[in-house]
Image (tube, grey):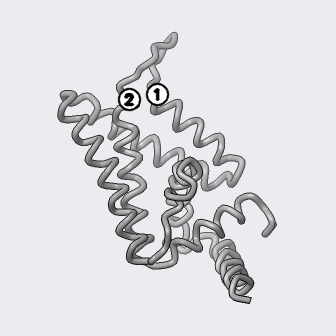
Amino acid sequence: MNTDSKLMDMLTGYAAAHQHPFNVFMHMIGIPTIMLGALIPMTWLEFALPGFTINLAHIVILGFFLFYLTLDLMFAIVFLVASLLLEMLASSLGQLPLAVSGGIAAAAFFGGYAGQFVGHYVERSMPVLVKHPIQANLAAPFFTVVELFKIVGLRKDLFDIVQQQIAERRAAEQA
């Protein structure tokens, strides 16, 4: 396995700030919740094409998927499937009256972020969102998939290398 790849750099940087189990838990709940909150209003913008209709949420998910393909095929495919399921929920919620769907979207979006800040408070680490907001929002859904793989015990070799690189970075910083 190539330990000098863009994937390894991203995983190591992200994992270093997400070691506490409570923080990981808050992210596993918070990131999909934020995504739901963002996807609901995106489903309101539909584009009719010959034979089918797509919405802004589909386009954004496709863009994320294409970016994630540059990192890892399996993680990208799992992201795509999970995101399309989340988009289906968002689309259903988006059909509710605007005040209801907008309220759900806002509560999910801001509530998901609040949960992540609580997780980082417990871990005593600065959220990546504060330092690099664009990078954090592009990478967070990907890392949710990666963490899911870790939780179920898949690709253990990858996570062992990530933990080793975190330990090496911390040792170098202390030296």
Q: In terms of secondary structure, where does tag 1 sit? A: helix
Return the mark for residue 43.
2
- The answer to whether the residue labelled 2 contacts the one labelled 1, judged by CB atoms less than 8 Å apart, is yes
Locate residue 66: give its quadrant.
top right
For this rendering, which residue is in front, 90 or 13?
13
Q: Residues within 10 Å of mark 2 (few under 14, many from 20)?
A: many
| Residue lying at the far top of the rendered structure | 50
Quarter holding the C terminus is: bottom right
For residue 15, side relative to residue 148 (left or right): right
The answer to whether 41 is drawn above or below residue 46 in the figure is below
Looking at the picture, how far across and down is residue 133, in whole percent? 53, 51
Amino acid under disc 2: Thr
For residue 101, side relative to residue 33 (left or right): left
* Residue underneath mark 1: 56
Cα separation, mark 2 vs mark 1, equals: 6 Å
For residue 108, side relative to residue 172 (left or right): left
For residue 97, side relative to residue 59 (left or right): left
Q: Residue at x 18, y 31 (%)?
A: 99
